[in-house]
Amino acid sequence: MSVSTPAVPAPSSDVVVQEVAGVAYTPLETGSTVLLGVLALLISGLLGLLLSTLADEHRLAASGIGLAAMLEALSTGLVTGLAGAVLKPKRLRVVAALAAVALVAINLATVRTSGEGILGIRALAGLPEGVLLWIAIGFIARTQTPERWAAVLFTGMGITQLGAATLLTVYILPRFGANGGYVMLAVAAALCLPLTAFIPRALHDLPGTGSGASGAPPPKGWIALFATLCYTAPIAAVAVYIVPLAHQAGLSTGAGRTAISVGLACQIAGGALATGLAGRVRYITVFGFCGAALLTTWATYAGSAPATLFIAMSGLAGLCGGLGGPFLVPMTIEIDPTRRTAMQSGAVQLLAGAFGPLLAALVVGERQDHGVLFLAGALLIVSLAVMVALHRASRARRTPAAAA
């Protein structure tokens, strides 16, 4: 089967990333594509701030906060996954520009929306966000060290979201309310437009495919995506309940909020660490460390830990969140070398961000939040067990081939 190659720049001394198919990209193309994904996911770190402000302004019911967040995350994840399965990565500059314009319009439309309209308009926002993320993930999945570029994406997300959250809290929301926040998001989406002039015009076909679209993952790829879901969902579930868990440990709201801030800062450090470890450490080693650290953290939450220990363990959990996420990509590639499964990894992580808190809501009570810790521990153990089984199966397949 012949594989078509899109027009790309010839390799040169300033190339920083190489495709598995041998296509090289310049620093400007690489940075622009990854930054496109960072800006597309800026909203994910600001949902709580913006939606709670809408509720305070009586434009959204309190019960609608979680529903609006879930709808936007679900639509983003579904569009990212569907695009990766059926769309050809061609004419990407035009596609990205149209998505950016749509996202600017939707964010501005949110300014004049209230009530149930918020749910619809934010679900609609997930469509262009998913398309922009599909372009970034498609690029990352095709690189020779995808965990490195996924780590760069995670780190960039953490830095921009922390900076945007600080700007919202200190200046924009007190003066302009939720409308100011959504105008800020519209400006961020507008920044995607100049970037579209520098991303690759097209991406090479994935190994083993000639259609341009990646197609559905193979059976073992779906198992790897299940492990991804079970790994990411409990982290998201526990993160939502940090302040209630601090209260149950006898700590103040301030301690809980400090734990969240420390966790976000350490998540950035974890992404930077993953960037340095990419290509040097096996993913199974990373998940062994992260699994043990997360289970220890959640066991600490279940007790009556002092504030310093509670905050320190939150920092450890944040470090693991930033470190482990990028290594989910090489886990899927080991199982499915065609990288069709890797194309769906980002979408599944987004869906897990909505699925985890939804499951948590079913196991917590009015005054008892420890149920989320037991749920998280069970899901994490299942995930690690599946990863180990898949890794051993892959090694067993490679051994006879190496011997031959």
Image (cartoon, rainbow, N blue to C red):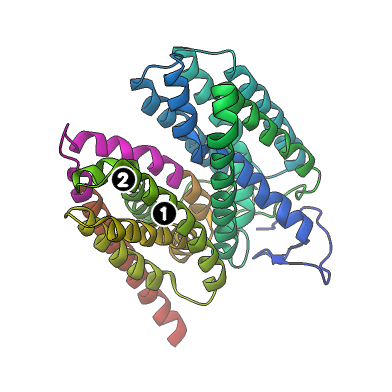
Q: Is residue 85 left or right of residue 244?
A: right
Secondary structure found at label 2: helix
In the rendered structure, are the residues bearing label 2 and label 1 in contact, judged by CB atoms less than 8 Å apart?
A: yes
Question: Quadrant location of residue 128?
Answer: top right
Residue 312 image point, x, y percent: 34, 61
Percent x, y of residue 214: 57, 49
Answer with the quarter of the image where residue 125 lies.
top right
Residue drawn at x 77%, y 47% is 201
* Crowd rating for badge 2 (residues with CA inside 10 Å; few <14, some 14–19, many 20+): many
What is the three-letter code of the residue carrying label 2? Ile
Magenta-colored span? 348-374
Q: Is residue 388 left or right of residue 127?
A: left
What residue do we see at 78% from left, 56% from top? 28
Q: Is residue 403 left or right of residue 171?
A: left
In which quadrant is the N terminus drawn? bottom right
Q: Quadrant of residue 63?
A: top left
**Which residue position is annotated with label 2?**
242
Residue type for callout 1: Gly
Local packing at callout 1 (Cα closer than 10 Å; few below 14, some 14-19, many 20+) is many
Q: Is residue 190 above or below residue 59?
A: below
Is residue 335 in view from this perspective?
yes
Decide which of 361, 341 is in the foreground and name it: 361
The residue at the point 56 percent across, 36 percent down is: 170
Q: Which sits earlier in the primary sequence, circle 2 or circle 1?
A: 2
Q: Which mark is residue 263?
A: 1
Label 1 SS: helix
User: Does residue 100 appear left or right of residue 278 in this picture?
Assistant: right
